[in-house]
Amino acid sequence: MKKNLLAALFIGAAVLPSLQGCFPAIAAGVTTGVLAAVDRRSLGTQTEDESIEWKSSSRVSEKLGDKAHLNFTSFNRKVLMTGEVPSAEAKAEAERIATGVVNVQGVYNELTVGPASSFSDRSNDAFVTSKIKSRSVDSGKYNPVHVKVVTEAGVAFLLGMVTQPEADSAINVARTTAGVKKVVNLLEIITPAKARELDVAQSSNTNQQK
């Protein structure tokens, strides 16, 4: 039952943002709230990451306009940039802008120089992400909340704060998922003791807010 609930939440988190209308937006907010409660990042860091994503996207889009397809994912104040840009100069400019956003501590520039991907390509990437998240739940070897998955052109990027065994399991799940061409490991390795400390702290904070 618990696995089914987690799978539904993860698939919802991956698919709902691509839908239109008021209800999906509300549902996505509820899903995000549930997952945030067990995230190893503090609520303050989660909020900063959301702000970093919004500011990076806004500033880079303002500079490059509709010439590029850009995605920004921030985890623990480190920004992953994926998508397509028209030139090497645009790629460098996007990184410069993102690096200058307040609280950003690092940038992974994975932008590709070339034409923007199609809607069908992006839909397929969202589907692959949902499969990785669902299989993460089924594996039972780590808490999938602790691993953020971003798929771009069949390349699965993994971010999060995990122990080495958790990282190994997450990489294996992504690597063996149909549709994944390559896995890029951006996971931050922490000790088991640190993982327990963060899990207990987040659980305590959540209980205090009830």
Image: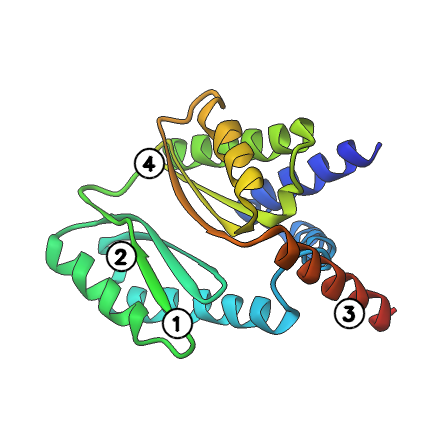
- For the residues labelled 3 and 4, the Cα–Cα distance comes to 42 Å
Picture quarter containing residue 121?
top left
Left or right, residue 143 beside residue 124: right
| Residue underneath mark 3 | 205
Picture quarter containing residue 206?
bottom right
Task: Categorize mark 1 by other alpha carbons within 10 Å: few (<14), some (14-19), many (20+).
Answer: many
Q: Position of residue 136 (x, y in %)?
A: 61, 33
Indicate the secondary structure of the residue bearing disc 3: helix
Disc on res. 104? 1
| Residue underneath mark 2 | 66
Given contact means CB atoms under 8 Å apart, are the residues at marks 4 and 1 in contact? no
Indicate the secondary structure of the residue bearing disc 2: helix
How many marks can you see?
A: 4
- For the residues labelled 2 and 3, the Cα–Cα distance comes to 41 Å
Amino acid identity at mark 4: Ser
Task: Categorize mark 4 by other alpha carbons within 10 Å: few (<14), some (14-19), many (20+).
Answer: few
Indicate the secondary structure of the residue bearing disc 4: loop
